Image (spheres, helix red, strand yellow):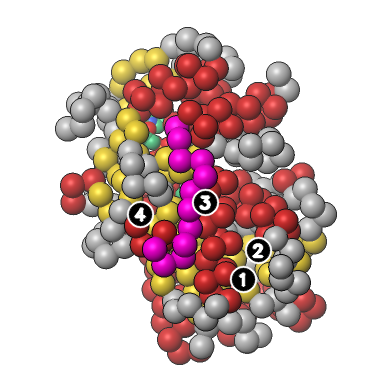
Amino acid sequence: MSTEHVLVTGGAGYIGSHVVRQLSEAGYRVIVYDNLSTGSAEALVHGETLVVGDLEDTGKLDGVFRSYAPAAVLHFAAAIVAPESVSDPLKYYANNTANTLRLLQACVRHGVGRFIFSSTAAVYGFPEGGIAAESSPTVPINPYGTSKLMSEWMLRDTALAHGLRYVALRYFNVAGADPQSRMGQRTPEATHLIKVSCQAALGMRQGVSIFGTDYPTADGTGIRDYIHVEDLAAAHLAALAYLEREGESDTFNVGYGRGSSVREVIRVVREVSGIDFPVTEAARRPGDPGELVARADRIRNVLGWEPKFDDLQTIVADAWRWERKLAGV
Ligand SMILES: NC(=O)c1ccc[n+]([C@@H]2O[C@H](COP(=O)([O-])OP(=O)(O)OC[C@H]3O[C@@H](n4cnc5c(N)ncnc54)[C@H](O)[C@@H]3O)[C@@H](O)[C@H]2O)c1
Ligand SMILES: O=c1ccn([C@@H]2O[C@H](COP(=O)(O)OP(=O)(O)O[C@H]3O[C@H](CO)[C@H](O)[C@H](O)[C@H]3O)[C@@H](O)[C@H]2O)c(=O)[nH]1
């Protein structure tokens, strides 16, 4: 049990709010810094302190560091829509790269020693054989991935120069919701397959398009490593504990190391919901790799992370329950 303050940027968002809840339950005193551009104060369920502010506002950020002297910073705040990053790249370099720079400068000014960073499998682009290890080449194919990779580099160099230790977590396909439906993915226009399929089952969308049926995979559709947001959140607590026991700075994939195809996901959403929503076959979505699965042994070995929800049925059931609650049905 820790009584230290930790600062969580983007803590009112989808992933951050799950981590915030788990941190509170573990005894941390959590300060959330969020501009509520996509996040919601309702996602903070244990009365955590919310400072509504933008990372660009370094004056406000400095005030937070002065008031709470956080022992650690967990950095989720970002713009996250990969296709939008192609049409508006500077938004991504501003909000993801430049704002991470501002946050790191504040950490150095205030002597913060521990930092956890939300990175993404998008840093790998199209990995050889569809499987990415942490040592695989980082060749992002869109500005979103590049903005995150640049942040990883700044973090690495800052750590070396200023005695800060960090863990960068490269998330694969995050899905599902709090098993008690207190929080989940709120953005109605989200494009993620499991959310879209649940919305289709609820009749909120006309159906689901399968983007590409001619990939060199067993059923021709794209394969991804879907990870339950609750397990992903637990990885952050494992990372924080690792830094607290003086672990060295490091970067880890967070996935299960096992892929599911688009057809499998749709079949499970139909089964779980009991609703046979329309599915159409469409062309490949530009920039989509056929297969993207994590090599995921390092995080288990080094951080001691053990997933508890490694099952597509469970992920979909929790996503489905949340989506119904959000829709009020
Ligand atoms: N969702 C995924 O599948 C996925 C996959 C890989 C990596 N990630 C990373 O995880 C992190 C969280 O993603 P999410 O899915 O929870 O997204 P989200 O949009 O729900 O959360 C982002 C949060 O950051 C806040 N925010 C954004 N810009 C800000 C700024 N300038 N100042 C202060 N607050 C700001 C938003 O209001 C929101 O609460 C991001 O860094 C994202 O790149 C997400
Ligand atoms: O309506 C849809 C939506 C998705 N897909 C397919 O389903 C799979 C998963 O697509 P998502 O949009 O759910 O997720 P992505 O794999 O494209 O990307 C997500 O995971 C990446 C990391 O792996 C990045 O973090 C990225 O930001 C995040 O959106 C892909 O094969 C995609 O082509 C469909 O067939 N129809």
Looking at marks 1 and 2 on the same chain, the residue that comes earlier in the sequence is marked by 2
- The reply to whether dot 4 and dot 2 touch (C-beta < 8 Å) is no
In the image, the residue with mark 3 has its CB under 8 Å from the nearest atom of ligand 1: no
Looking at marks 4 and 1 on the same chain, the residue that comes earlier in the sequence is marked by 1
Residue 322, percent across and down? 64, 31
Looking at marks 3 and 2 on the same chain, the residue that comes earlier in the sequence is marked by 2
Q: In front of the other: label 4 or label 1?
A: 4
Residue receiving disc 2: 8
Residue receiving disc 1: 73
Picture layout, residue 67 above or below residue 169: below
Instruction: Tell me which segment is drawn in magenta.
Output: 301-312
Locate the N terminus by quadrant: bottom right
At 31% from the left edge and 18% from the top edge, which residue is drawn?
281
| Disc 1 from disc 2: Cα separation | 6 Å
- The reply to whether dot 3 and dot 1 touch (C-beta < 8 Å) is no
Q: In front of the other: label 3 or label 1?
A: 3
Disc 2 residue type (three-letter): Val
Looking at marks 4 and 2 on the same chain, the residue that comes earlier in the sequence is marked by 2
- The reply to whether dot 4 and dot 1 touch (C-beta < 8 Å) is no
Picture layout, residue 191 above or below residue 53: above
Residue 192, percent across and down? 47, 35
Q: Badge 3, how many Cα within 10 Å: few under 14, some, many 20+? A: many
Q: Does 76 sit left or right of 119 as displayed?
A: right
Q: Out of 25 and 13, give the one closest to the viewer.
A: 25
Disc 4 residue type (three-letter): Ala
At 70% from the left edge and 53% from the top edge, which residue is drawn?
21
- The reply to whether dot 1 and dot 2 touch (C-beta < 8 Å) is yes
Q: Quadrant of residue 260?
A: top left
